[in-house]
Amino acid sequence: MKVVKIGLVKKSLFVLLATLIAVTFCGCSLFGSQIKPAVYISQSEITLQVGETVKLSAVTTDENSVTWVSGSDEIATVDAEGLVTGVSVGETLLTVASSSAMASCTIKVVEKSSVGGDGSGGTGTPADPEIFTLYLDSIKMKTGETITLKAVSSLGDDIEWESSRPEVAKVDGGRVTALRAGTTEITAKTEKVSAKCSVTVTQAVIEGADKDGYALIWNDEFEGTSLDTSKWDYQIGIKDNYHGKEYGENYWGNWELQYYTQNAVSVADGSLKITATKQNMGDRSYTSGRILTRDKASWTYGYFEAKIKTPTGDGMWPAFWMLPQPSSFDNITNEYGGWAANGEIDIMEAKGRLNNKVDTTIHFGGAWPDNQYLTHETTLSSNTDQWHTYAVDWTEDYIAWYVDGRQVYKLLNNQWYSTASQSAAAPFDKPFYILLNLAVGGTYDPSAQIDPNFTSAAMYVDYVRVYEKIA
C-alpha cells in the first residue's frame, strides 16, 4: 500500500483496492488469502486553531458504516459525519472505526491566530493536500483469471476505468480480465483524481503445453460453452466487413459457396466446432463459420500451433492461417498495402477430397495480380479427420512448418519479398493475426465436385497456442 499527496484539492479521498477474486484455473485465492478489512482516513495528522473546523472523510474495504470518536472532547470534538472542531490547545487522537477495522488521525489544536486562509495557522478549513490511498499498486494474474478492483470517492464522483493495454488485460466497471501475457496499467479516475494499478499477466500453466526453448504467451483451450469473444471475432457473410466498411471481392475472392454465420461456430466438450451445412443463406447454398483474432491479438514472430481434425470429402476447405493486422481501423491492409504485398501465412489448409494431405503455403510479392506463392504438400499418417497438430515457427530469418511435431517445410527470408519494402524479412516482419475457417467449394480445389447428398460436415479444434522464443 502507498499513500501519495496529490495537489491541493480539499476533503477528497480516493482508494483503489481489490475486493473480489475469481480464479479460472484454480480454486485458491490469487493473493493466497482474502484481503483483510481496513479503514482509510483522508488525513493522518492535522493542525487546527481553537474554534476551527475541518471535515475528514473515511472509506472501508468492507463497506461497513463507521463511527468517529475523539480521544478528548476537551481538546477536539468530532460528529458522526467526521466534522472535527478544535476546542482547546492540546493534542488528541481521533479514531474512525468500522465493525472490523479502524484508522486514526492525530489532531493538534493551537491558539487562534489573526493570520488565516492558508492552512498554516489561520482560520478556516486547512488546505491539506488530497491524500490518495492505493491499497494495491500492483498485482499479478494468470491468463483467464479475473479480479474486481474497487474505487471509492468520498465526493461520490463517477468513476471511469481504462486499461493501457486492453489486449493484455481488459477492464469493465472495475472487473479486470487477464487475456494474454504482458503488462498493463489499470486506471480508475474521477474528474479530480486518479489511481493506477500495475498488472502483470503470465500465462497459466497448461498441462502438456510446455515447449523447450519457448514460452506460452497466448492460448485458447476451448474449455467453455461458447466462443471466447475476448479472443476471437466472427466473420459474417460473403466478404470482409471491417469497422463498417466492406473490403475485397464477393465470395471472399475465391468463389466460395458458403455464407459465414455465427451459428456455425460452437464450443463444447473442450473443442471448437465449425460446421458446414447445406442450407440457403443469401445467395449461397451452404453456411459455415470463420473466426479470427484481428484487433484482439496479433504477433510478429513466434511458434503457432493448433490441434485440429478436419472433414474429408469433395469441396471441404478447412484452414488454419494468418493475415496481417490492419494498421488502422480505416485501412484493412498494413503499411505494405494490399494482398499479397503484405503477406499471408497458411499454416494448414486441406482439399477434403484428398483425405490425408495438407498444404503449407506463404503468399507474398506484389499486390494482386502480381502476387507470388510457395507451397508444400504433406502426406499425413492418417486422414485429416483424425487429430493432428499443425504448427509454424515464424522468425525474421525463416518460416518452418510442422505436422505432428515433425518439420515438413522450411523457407528462408531470401525466398520471399514484398514490392512495398526493402526489408529482407518483408512482408513477414509485421504483426499477423490468426484465422480458423471451413470454406465450401472455391478455387482452391477446382476439381472438387460436392456430393449432391451432402448435408453437413465439421472441423474441430482442440486448442490454439502461441509461443515466443526464450532468449
Image: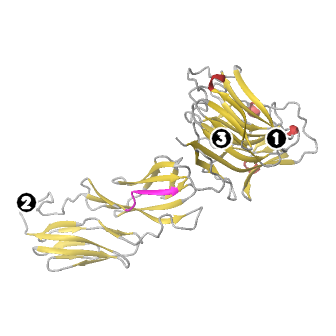
Residue 168 image point, x, y percent: 52, 48
Which is more foreground, mark 1 or mark 2?
1
Question: Mark 3 near mark 2, Cβ–Cβ under 8 Å?
Answer: no
- Secondary structure of the residue carrying tag 3 is strand
Q: What residue type is labelled 2?
A: Val
Query: Which of the 4 image quadrants contains residue 241?
Result: top right
Residue underneath mark 2: 115
Membership of 188 in magenta stretch: no
Q: How crowded is mark 3: few (under 14 residues within 10 Å), some or many (20 or more)?
A: many
Which is more foreground, mark 3 or mark 2?
3
Name of the residue lying farthest toward the left? 114
Residue 70 image point, x, y percent: 22, 78
Name of the residue lying farthest toward the front? 212
Which of the labelled discs sits on residue 380, or is there none? 1
Q: Note whether 274 is above or below 247 in the view shown.
A: below
Q: Closer to the N terminus: mark 3 or mark 2?
A: 2
Asked if one can make out residue 456 in the rendered structure from this viewpoint, the answer is yes
- Secondary structure of the residue carrying tag 2 is loop
Q: Residues within 10 Å of mark 1 (few under 14, many from 20)?
A: some
Q: Nearer the viewer, residue 99 or 403?
A: 403
Query: Mark 1 and mark 2: span between their CA atoms?
Result: 90 Å
Q: Which amino acid does label 3 sit on?
A: Ile
Residue 2 image point, x, y percent: 32, 59
Residue underneath mark 3: 434
Query: Mark 3 and mark 1: span between their CA atoms?
Result: 23 Å
The segment highlighted magenta reads: 135-141
Which of the labelled discs sits on residue 229, or is there none? none
Q: Note whether 56 is above or below 346 in the view shown.
A: below
